[in-house]
Image (cartoon, grey):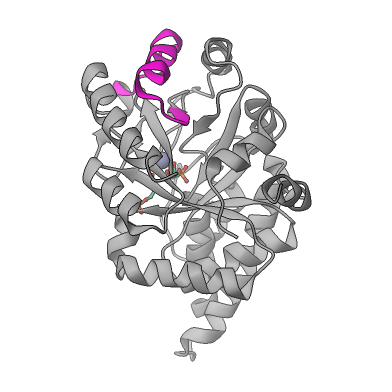
Amino acid sequence: MIVTTKELFKAAYGKYAIGAYNINNLEQTMGLFRGCIDSSAPFIIQISKGARSYTDKIMIEGLIRSADQVFPDAIFAVHLDHGDEQTCYDCINSGFYSSVMIDASAEPFEKNVEITKRVVDAAHAKGIVVEAELGKLGGVEEHVSVNEADAKLTDPDQAKKFVELTGCDSLACAIGTSHGAFKFSGTQGLHFDVLSAIQKNLPGFPLVMHGSSSVPQDEVARINAAGGNLKGAKGVDDTQFRRAAELGVTKINIDTDGRLVWTRVHREYFIEHPENFDLRPVGKVFMSEYAKFIADKNAKLGSAGQLEAVRKLVSK
Ligand code: G3H
Ligand code: 13P
Ligand code: ZN
């Protein structure tokens, strides 16, 4: 069942966070749904601009519609990840997405407000909710490139003003994370002081943490042992998810960790089975490993076991 992120956030706020997972293909879609059903968790499917053009945006929608039929118990939101203004309108008008993210965070404050407000007005007219972003994460995003050195944490006073001026439904804040597999140069970590100040200014308002992959060191070691080269990769300590959730983070974005599962499975599989050239045996291993990975993440986010409580809330 497709719901809006707003409904999911109402259930989760202050208690746990909903996992927001990026998908690009059939195997990820199957693994994601299986993992969420196995762990009884509501979830958010994220589709980036890159995912929409990897095959075709219609293909990705078709995969999700089919998964909804194959897993009738699943409750999830369909969300555009890091949209520009035009892609937001495309998704709003498609009638398929329940939530879009407008990412105008690279623009000056006033321009970010202006663009976000236009998208909010168009989305709300169709019952679709909007995530916006204020502050700059480190690392590289699809259409926004920011050096770690230039990363700018979200200003709590600006955050309050931004939400009032735009009417957005949730806010992605920069609190020290970055996208990709190489986070936290030096001794940097999550800035809970900034998060706490944002929550004080926006009590009850859903916050979003991007760049939240934990880049497990055992996964990195296995990839490197199987011929990969990811030296120095590191991520967010996922035991901190619950603390972030208590401070108003209701959506936690994870993409890179799933890519690491894919890379480890495929590298190891073909070393162990050099004679194999059938794509299905390795695909089956990946779907099963991906489902396990998702269930484990949901346990860390606190969303595992919440599916029936959310069902009661959304069917009221
Ligand atoms: O924040 C970006 C997400 O990890 C999506 O990545 O744009 O390469 O699909 P992508
Ligand atoms: P990671 O690169 O840490 O997985 O972050 C993903 C993300 O923020 C997608 O929007
Ligand atoms: Zn992101």
Residue 41 vertical position relative to residue 281 in the rendered view, above or below: above
Q: Which residue is nearer to you in this view: 256 or 19?
A: 19
Q: Residue 217 location in percent, x, y?
A: 58, 47
Which residue sits furthest top? 157
Q: Is residue 198 shown left or right of residue 73?
A: left
**Which residue is painted at 43% across and 72% down in the image?**
62
How many discs appear? 0
Q: Is residue 94 shown left or right of residue 284?
A: left
Q: Residue 94 location in percent, x, y?
A: 33, 58
Residue 308 vertical position relative to residue 62 in the rendered view, above or below: above
Residue 227 seen in the current view? yes
Q: Which residue is nearer to you in this view: 70 or 287?
A: 70
Residue 74 vertical position relative to residue 273 in the rendered view, above or below: above
**Which residue is painted at 65% across and 29% down in the image?**
245
- The magenta region covers 150-172
* Residue 82: quadrant of the picture: top left
* Residue 31: quadrant of the picture: bottom right
Q: Is residue 253 on the magenta stretch?
A: no
Residue 273 seen in the current view? no
Q: Which residue is nearer to you in this view: 152 or 33?
A: 33
**Which residue is painted at 37% across and 18% down in the image?**
162
Quadrant that contains the N terminus: bottom right
* Residue 287: quadrant of the picture: bottom right
Q: Is residue 265 shown left or right of residue 39?
A: left
**Which residue is painted at 69% across and 35% down in the image?**
16
Q: Residue 132 location in percent, x, y?
A: 38, 32
Q: Residue 144 location in percent, x, y?
A: 25, 37
